[in-house]
Image: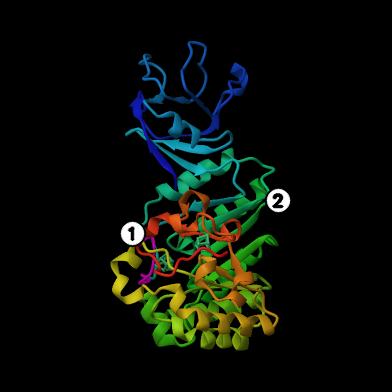
Amino acid sequence: MLSIQGTPTNIKTSIIGRVLKTRKNPFSRRKSILVTETKKQSDFGYIATICKDVSSSQEASSISGLSIHDLQLLHEGDIVMIKVDGTVSVLWEGNNQNNAFLLTTACDCRCLMCPQPPEKDSFEHLEIAFETLKLIDKNYSGEICLTGGEPLLLGKRFIDFLDQCARTAPKASIILLTNGKKYADFKFAKEIAQLNLNRLMHCVSLHADVDDLHDFIVQSPGSFAQTNRGLYNLAKLYQRIEIRCVVSRLNAYRLPQIAWYIYRNFPFVDHVTFMALEMTGLALKNKEKVWIDPFDYQESLEEAVRYLHRGLLRVSVYNHPLCLVSQKTRSFARKSISSWKNVYRKECEGCREKENCCGFFETSGDVMSKHIRPIS
Ligand code: SF4
Ligand code: SF4
C-alpha cells in the first residue's frame, strides 16, 4: 500500500475519503478530500485537504507540507485514509484496474515464505474495507483482490463483505486469495457458493504434491489434507478455482511432480499459477531456507508448465522476470506485480522485453538473481 507522510492539522481520528484534484461545487464535496498545491479560502466542505503549503487554518482537517512529487502520487478517484499522525495511505487506486482489500492479518498458517507475517487480528482492517467499499465507483470493471492473512477466518463477516463487494461493483472480477483450509467445511463453502457469484475466483495456495512438504512449508500440520478437501468441496459446488504454487528452495525441483499431482487430482481447476518469491516478511527472515534464484529452477518450471499446458489446463507464471525463465516458458509469464511495488533494475534499460516483463518487487530489496540480462 502506497503511503506518504505530511504534517497533520486538526486530524482527531482516521478519515477515509475520495481524492479530488479539481475543485467541485460545494454540493459535491461531501466525502471528498481535496488534493491541491495551495489551499484557498473557498476550499470548505471537503472532509479534509492535502496540500503542499503548511496550513494556516487551525479549523479544517488537513495534511500539509507534502512535496509536489508526493501530491502527484495521488490521483483523482483514489480512496485514501488520513491518520492522526499525518500518514496518507492509498486504499484504492482510481486509475488502476487491479485493486485489493486487506481484510485481516490473522492466518491459520505461518508459511516460511509469507511476505506478510500473520498477526493477531485487528477488526480495523475489515472496517476500513467496508468504508472504502462505500466510496468506490459502482462502474468499476477491473479486478478486486480480497487478501489477508486468511480472509476466510472472518467467517460470516467475510461472507457479508463478499456479498457487499459483489453488489457494489457488479462488473468487477473478484479474486480471493486463500489457503483453502476453511473450505474443508462443506457447509461454509456452500454458504459462499449460494451467493452465486460467477465473477468470483477462489485462488487456493498449494505448494507441494505430498503432505509432509506442504505442511512443512505452511508450518501447520494437517493443512495439506484440509486444502485438498477444500478444493473438492469447491468443485462439488461448481466454483471457479485457481491453484497458486509459490516456488521456493523447498519445492523448486518438485514442480513437475506438483504439476502431475494437480493434473491428476484437480483437472477441474480453471487456472494454475507458479509464483516467484517476494523476499520480505517471513520470506526474508527464512531466507536461508526459502530463497532460490529463479534462473536455477527454470528447467523444472518449464517441465511443469509444459505438462499442464499439454493437459489443456490454463497455466501462468507470475513474478518471474523474462530473462530468468527459459525461452519456452516466456509466453506463460505475466506482468503480475502491483504497480506501486513494481521496479526494474538498471540492467533492464535497453531490454527489448521490458514492456512485457513483470520486473521485480521493490519490497525484495537486494535479494536478487545474479542472472539478470537484457534481452536483445
Ligand atoms: S502466505 Fe498466506 S497462508 Fe501463508 S501464512 Fe501468509 S497469509 Fe497465511
Ligand atoms: S532485463 Fe529486466 S526487463 Fe529485461 S527481461 Fe530481464 S528483468 Fe525483464
Marks 2 and 1 sit apart, C-alpha to C-alpha, by 33 Å
Q: Secondary structure at mark 1?
A: loop
Magenta-drawn segment: 110-119
Name the residue at 43% across, 68% down.
277
Q: Which residue is mark 1?
A: 119
What's the amino acid at mark 2?
A: Lys
Judging depth in this view, the residue of 244 and 280 nearest the camera is 280
Task: State the image coordinates of residue 183 (x, y, percent, origin top left).
Answer: 53, 72
Q: Is residue 116 magenta?
A: yes
Judging depth in this view, the residue of 91 and 75 nearest the camera is 75
Task: State the image coordinates of residue 335 (x, y, percent, origin top left).
Answer: 57, 60
Q: Is residue 345 visible?
A: no
Question: Badge 1: how crowded within 10 Å, few (<14), some, or many (20+)?
Answer: few
Task: State the image coordinates of residue 164 (x, y, percent, origin top left).
Answer: 60, 50
| Residue 83 location, quadrant | top left
Q: Is residue 180 above or below residue 229?
A: above
